[in-house]
Image (cartoon, rainbow, N blue to C red):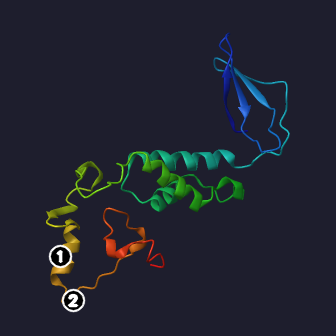
Amino acid sequence: MLCRHQRQRPNGSIYWWCSVRSNKSRCPATVIQSGSNFRPGSHQHNHDSAPGAIIKLKIVSQSKQEAATNVFKPAAQIVNEAMVSHSDHTAPAGSRPNVHNLQTSTNRLREKSRPKDPTDLNFEINYDFLPENFFKKDVVDSNRHLFFATDSQLDALSSAKVWYMDATFKIISKPFLPDVFDTSIHSYW
């Protein structure tokens, strides 16, 4: 039974309400907490139990905690590690959250801690959000060029005879998108 805090009474009792709800109805089941004692309320659940819900909750909780503390780790890796550490192959399918949805919510959680996107090219770089030794150079002339690379990437480039470049312009937002690549004109990219 997954519950959420509903309200606290003047006598200190806390009422917990079942979190199962839909547009048409909600489960009326309650639990009353007095200190460390819990007792069922007067109403019972009006739905089937969700086997494995505690495992699912642990996976989601670990994923979100890790995402909040490690902004550079990919969401897919965070979710995979949580799934491996808490999944039970004998538990029902309901014990595993939808991986894609959890990765998306993990990334959304991190959006709140990231700096706002710049609106023009005259912005300060916040080095707290960059891995150590990843930012290489900021060149400002009539445009602005930011160079990012690891040392191993620079070593590979320095030994290559030919460089090939590719870009996905549809994910680039202003002010970094040159006017010639206006996404409203070239939305098929």
The quarter of the rendered structure image containing the C terminus is bottom left
Q: Does residue 153 appear to the left or right of 92 in the view shown?
A: left
Q: Is residue 188 above or below residue 138?
A: below
Q: Give the amino acid at mark 2.
A: Val
- x, y percentage for residue 129? 30, 51
Q: Nearest the camera: 124 or 42? A: 124
At x 80% / y 37%, what residue is drawn?
Answer: 27
Dot 2 or dot 1, earlier in sequence: 1
At x 65% / y 60%, what residue is drawn?
Answer: 89
Q: Does residue 133 appear to the left or right of 85 in the view shown?
A: left
At x 82% / y 40%, what residue is drawn?
Answer: 25
- x, y percentage for residue 126? 25, 49
At x 38% / y 52%, what residue is drawn?
Answer: 71
Report crowding for label 1: few under 14, some 14 to 19, many 20 or more residues within 10 A (C-alpha).
Answer: few
- Residue 162: give its label: 2
Report crowding for label 2: few under 14, some 14 to 19, many 20 or more residues within 10 A (C-alpha).
Answer: few
Q: Does residue 148 appear to the left or right of 74 in the view shown?
A: left
Q: Is residue 125 above or below residue 77?
A: above
Which residue is at the far top?
A: 11
Q: Nearest the camera: 42 or 146? A: 146
Q: CA distance from mark 2 to mark 1?
A: 14 Å
| Disc 1 target residue | 155
What count of labels does the image hold?
2
- Judging from the image, what secondary structure is the residue with disc 1 in? helix
The quarter of the rendered structure image containing the N terminus is top right
